[in-house]
Image (cartoon, rainbow, N blue to C red):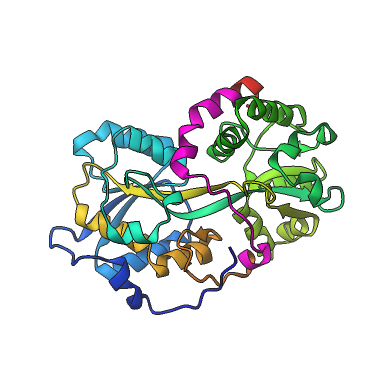
C-alpha cells in the first residue's frame, strides 16, 4: 500500500476523469456531503476549474442528510450524496435513493471491492481501523489481532469510542463475517469487560488517553494517527512520542478498512454533472488529493502517493471483504453491540 505521488497538471487528467462534454443545463451540481474535512475545498475547486461546473454544497451528519433526501423525494435538488461509511451508502441504496451509474470510467477505475454490486455507489478512498498502543507498556505482538483486545490481560486497559459509531459498527460487521456471530459477541463482551473508562470522545481522544496513562490500547482510524505524527503542536508531539499503532490481522484476513464514497441520486436534476463529478473523484488528480489532503488511501491502485505521514505507516495487507457485504452485516452488528452493553 505504500506509494509515492509526483504532482502533474490537473488538465492531463481531464480526458480520463470527464467522459462527456457538459450540457448547457448542467453547469451546476448540488452536493449533499457528510465529509467534514476542510482540505476537501481544494478537491471541489479542482472539479470546478476542470469543468466550469459550480458545486453547491450542503453539509450535515450522515443520518440527517439521509433522512432529508428521503423526505424531499422527487423534489430533492440533490444530485450526489457523499458519506464516510460503506454501511450508510448501502442503506441509501437499499432505500432506493441512488440511481445506477453505468460509467465505463468508474467501472474501470474503482475495484469491485470498493463499489456496490449494482454500481449505485462507489468508494473513492479508504481508511484502516488500527490498534493504538502505549509503546512503553504493550508489545505489538500482543495485539496482532482485533480479538486480542478482548483478552483478560487487558482488563481495565482499553479505551474506545461509542460502539454505536459507524467506525466500530463496520469493524464489528467484519468480525462477524470472518469469525461468526458467537465469537463476535464474545469479542464485544470482552471489549466491554476490559474498558478503562466508559466509551466517549473520538478516535484522537482515545490516543490522548493512552498518552495520559488512562489506558494502554485503543481503536483508531489510521489518519488520526497520521495527523498527530505530522503535527508540530506540543500536545500532539507528546502523544506521538508515547503512542504507536499496529495493523491487525496481518497473518489472517488483513486489516479492516472502510470507505468514503458516494453515488448519483435517483431524482438528480443534473445527472450529466453528477456523472462527471463521480468520474472526477476517480481521476488521478482527485485520488492523489484524498491521500495528500486527508491522509486517506486512494482506491485506484495505480495512483502514486507522496505523503510522508502515510509513508511512515508503511505497507500492510488489507481485508478484501466487499464493502457491500460488509454493510449488510450492520443490523446484526448493532444487535450484538447492544447485547454486549457497549454503549
Image: magenta residue range? 310-336
Q: Position of residue 314 (x, y in %)?
A: 66, 64
Whether residue 87 is visible here, answered yes or no, is yes
Residue shown at 18% from the left, 48% from the top: 269
Residue shown at 64% from the left, 45% from the top: 203
Quarter of the figure with the N terminus: bottom right
Q: Position of residue 60 (x, y in %)?
A: 41, 43
Residue shown at 56% from the left, 31% from the top: 164
In front of the other: 167 or 122:
122
The answer to whether 114 is drawn above or below residue 6 in the figure is above
Q: Given the current orientation, which residue lies at the most extreme left position?
A: 24
In front of the other: 91 or 198:
91
Residue 273 left/right relative to 109? left
The answer to whether 52 is drawn above or below residue 70 in the figure is below
Whether residue 231 is visible here, answered yes or no, is no
* Residue 2 counted in the magenta span: no
Q: Given the current orientation, which residue lies at the most extreme top position?
A: 339
The answer to whether 82 is drawn above or below residue 110 in the figure is above
* Residue 313 counted in the magenta span: yes
Identify the image quadrant of residue 45.
bottom left
* Magenta part, dominant SS: helix
Number of numbered labels in the structure image: 0
Q: Given the current orientation, which residue lies at the most extreme right position?
A: 136
Q: Position of residue 224 (x, y in %)?
A: 62, 53
Q: Position of residue 243 (x, y in %)?
A: 77, 54
Quarter of the figure with the C terminus: top right
Amino acid at each position: 500500500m505504500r506509494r509515492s505521488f509526483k504532482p502533474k497538471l490537473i488538465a492531463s487528467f481531464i480526458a480520463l476523469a470527464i467522459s462527456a462534454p457538459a450540457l448547457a443545463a448542467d453547469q451546476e451540481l448540488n452536493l449533499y456531503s457528510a465529509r467534514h474535512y476542510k482540505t476537501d475545498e481544494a478537491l471541489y475547486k479542482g472539479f470546478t476549474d476542470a469543468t466550469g461546473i459550480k458545486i453547491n454544497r450542503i453539509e450535515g451528519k450522515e443520518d440527517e442528510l439521509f433522512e432529508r433526501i428521503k423526505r424531499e423525494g422527487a423534489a430533492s435538488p440533490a444530485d450526489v450524496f457523499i458519506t464516510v461509511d460503506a454501511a450508510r451508502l448501502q442503506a441509501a441504496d437499499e432505500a432506493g435513493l441512488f440511481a445506477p451509474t453505468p460509467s465505463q470510467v468508474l467501472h474501470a477505475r474503482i475495484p469491485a471491492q470498493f463499489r456496490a454490486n449494482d454500481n449505485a455507489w462507489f468508494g473513492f478512498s479508504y481508511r484502516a481501523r488500527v490498534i493504538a498502543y502505549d509503546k512503553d507498556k504493550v508489545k505489538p505482538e500482543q495485539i496482532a489481532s482485533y480479538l486480542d483486545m478482548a483478552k483478560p490481560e487487558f482488563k481495565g486497559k482499553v479505551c474506545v469510542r461509542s460502539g454505536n459509531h459507524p467506525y466500530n459498527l463496520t469493524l464489528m460487521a467484519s468480525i462477524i463475517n470472518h469469525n461468526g456471530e458467537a465469537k463476535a459477541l464474545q469479542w464485544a463482551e470482552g471489549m466491554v469487560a476490559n474498558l478503562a473508562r466508559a466509551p466517549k470522545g473520538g478516535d484522537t481522544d482515545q490516543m490522548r488517553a493512552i498518552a495520559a496513562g488512562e489506558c494502554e490500547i485503543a481503536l483508531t482510524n489510521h489518519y488520526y494517527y497520521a495527523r498527530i505524527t505530522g503535527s508540530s503542536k506540543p500536545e500532539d508531539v507528546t502523544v506521538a512520542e508515547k503512542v504507536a499503532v499496529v495493523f491487525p490481522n496481518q497473518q489472517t484476513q488483513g486489516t479492516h478498512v472502510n470507505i468514503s464514497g458516494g453515488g448519483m441520486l435517483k431524482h438528480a436534476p443534473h445527472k450529466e454533472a453528477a456523472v462527471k463529478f463521480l468520474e472526477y473523484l476517480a481521476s488521478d488528480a482527485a485520488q492523489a488529493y484524498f491521500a495528500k489532503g486527508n491522509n486517506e488511501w486512494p482506491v485506484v491502485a495505480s495512483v502514486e502517493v507522496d505523503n510522508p505521514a502515510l509513508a511512515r505507516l508503511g505497507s500492510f495487507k488489507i481485508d478484501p471483504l466487499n464493502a457491500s457485504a460488509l454493510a449488510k452485516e450492520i443490523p446484526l452488528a448493532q444487535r450484538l453491540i447492544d447485547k454486549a452493553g457497549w454503549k
